[in-house]
Image: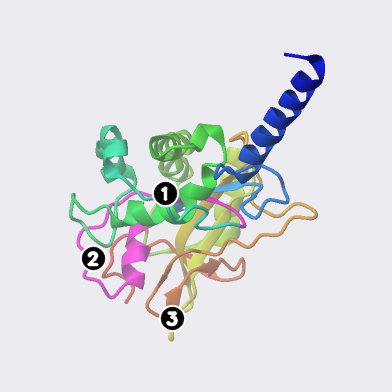
Amino acid sequence: MKPAKLHYWILGWCSMALCCWCTSDKFTQSDNHPHSWKKLYLAHHWPVTVCKMSANDCQDPPEYWTIHGLWPDKTEECNRTWHFNVTEIKDLLSDMRHYWPDVLHSSLNRTQFWKHEWEKHGTCAATLPILNSQKKYFSKALELYQHIDLNSCLLKAGIKPSSSYYQMTAIKETLTKFYGVTPKIQCLPPEEGEKAQTIGQIEFCFTKELQLRNCTALEGESDPVQADLKLGTEELSVCSDSLPTYYPSQVQDHK
């Protein structure tokens, strides 16, 4: 091939490759990309509080903190064609049912909760190679959950379900001292006639390198991720430092 023709052939090939790359349905990590994000939230929820929020007849919820989800900030439903397929996580099902159960629906064959979490949040987390499949996403969330080991941390600090109230500042200080970062803690506000808020969700934040970081927004960052848990008219919000905090042991308590 003559030099001139070779030159144009190379230019044409490069242009075609660049075009294909630009139109690829793979996500990029550019901060200007519509699906870009800066941190992940690993959300634990307290099953008794989840049941309290729901009109559903919740039976025997787990008496330990379970996974609510692994959520990138600032983005949701990044690929609506990437549907959940439970066969991709068949090797994880035993751990998923134990640590990431559908608290409101106890059927072992029910996968709607995981489908929701994957399609709303997992498809966005998948911009990271370490999370770019359903098996990677769910297995990494399980790994982070076991690494955090929130249940053991609270028990070691003497913070356990009780009919007595806790001070939210004491819970925050315990977690911050133990983990070295500030988590995000969410509560149900007091119902009419109550004086205490009810703890419902504790979120730990991670960088894209999956290192723990503060959940408080850094300078120039927004913090738009909401509680992502609204059942009926009840909704979680960031806990108040000034209100006593109830950590319920049973669904029927404290009505």
Q: Residues within 10 Å of mark 1 (few under 14, many from 20)?
A: some
Residue at image x 38%, y 57%?
A: 116
Residue pictured at 47% horizontal, 33% vertical: 147
- Residue named by callout 1: 82
The quadrant of the image that shows the C terminus is bottom left
Q: Amino acid at mark 1?
A: Trp
Image-based side of 242 in relation to 218, left or right: left
Q: Are marks 1 and 3 in contact (CB under 8 Å)?
A: no
What distance separates the C-alpha of mark 2 from that of mark 3? 19 Å
Mark toward the start of the polypeptide (1 vs 2): 2
Percent x, y for residue 174?
A: 57, 47
Q: Is residue 29 visible?
A: yes
Colour setting: rainbow
User: Element at badge 1?
Assistant: loop
What residue does disc 2 label? 58
| Label placed on residue 191 | 3
The mark closer to the camera, 1 or 2, is 1
Task: Identify which residue, 219 or 125, lies in the foreground.
Answer: 125
Q: Quadrant of the N terminus?
A: top right
Is disc 2 placed on a helix, strand or loop? loop
Label 3 crowding class (10 Å Cα cut-off): few <14, some 14-19, many 20+? few
User: Which span is picked out in magenta?
Assistant: 45-74
Residue sitting at x 41%, y 44%: 151
- Location of residue 9 with respect to 85 vertically, above or below: above
Q: Amino acid at mark 3?
A: Glu
